[in-house]
Image (tube, rainbow, N blue to C red):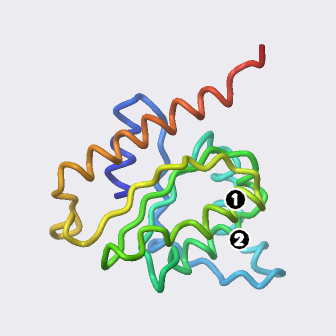
Amino acid sequence: MARCAATAWENLDCSVELVDLADRDLPLCDGGSCYEDPGVIALKESVSKAEAIIVAGPIYNFDINAAAKNFLELTGAAWRDKPVAILCAAGGNSSYMAPMSFANSLMLDFRCCVIPRFVFTTGDAFAHNTIVDPDVKLRIEELVTQLTKIAKALAGPLP
């Protein structure tokens, strides 16, 4: 889902940095020394520079997975006032509202503007880690377009 979103952003001539937490060796947030980790410092800088962010992750136990939550905790204030969209995949349809606690944290703790529509899908949309459902691809492209418009509007001059 994240790769599909990155491609959609590139098609809109936007600069994209795809951060795959599976490729990172991040410490668990301990509220102390974790913030001094070079990988955390680099990610915090990336988040800080971003004009908009898409969080893509799996649902585990009716919530965004722990890796995404840890990433948010490690990079904290760098998220402040960012427009954010959410993509998530789950094992079944019952957890379609699972990202809401993550979204609430973004809105309440960091004053993010969370797009009120996110893309949720199940494993049926994938084959060999590739999205094969054209409706899911279209929904991701629409979400990227909407997020881009909002990010540009928020960055523009005030009247």
Contact, CB < 8 Å: mark 1 with mark 2?
Answer: yes
For the residues labelled 1 and 2, the Cα–Cα distance comes to: 8 Å
* Residue 138 location (% of width, % of height): 27, 43
Name which residue lies at 78% across and 73% down: 36
- In the displayed structure, 24 sits above or below 139; it is below
Q: Quadrant of residue 100?
A: bottom right
Name which residue lies at 67% across and 63% down: 104
Name which residue lies at 61% across and 61% down: 103
* Residue 106 location (% of width, % of height): 68, 59
* Residue 146 location (% of width, % of height): 47, 36
- From the viewer's perspective, is 72 left or right of 64? right
- In the displayed structure, 61 sits above or below 138; it is below
* Residue 123 location (% of width, % of height): 24, 72
Write down the residue under mark 2: 74
Name which residue lies at 34% across and 54% down: 3
Write down the residue under mark 1: 44
Q: Which amino acid does the dot numbered 2 rest on?
A: Leu
- From the viewer's perspective, is 144 left or right of 46? left
Residue found at the far right of this picture: 32
Q: Which amino acid does the dot numbered 1 rest on?
A: Lys
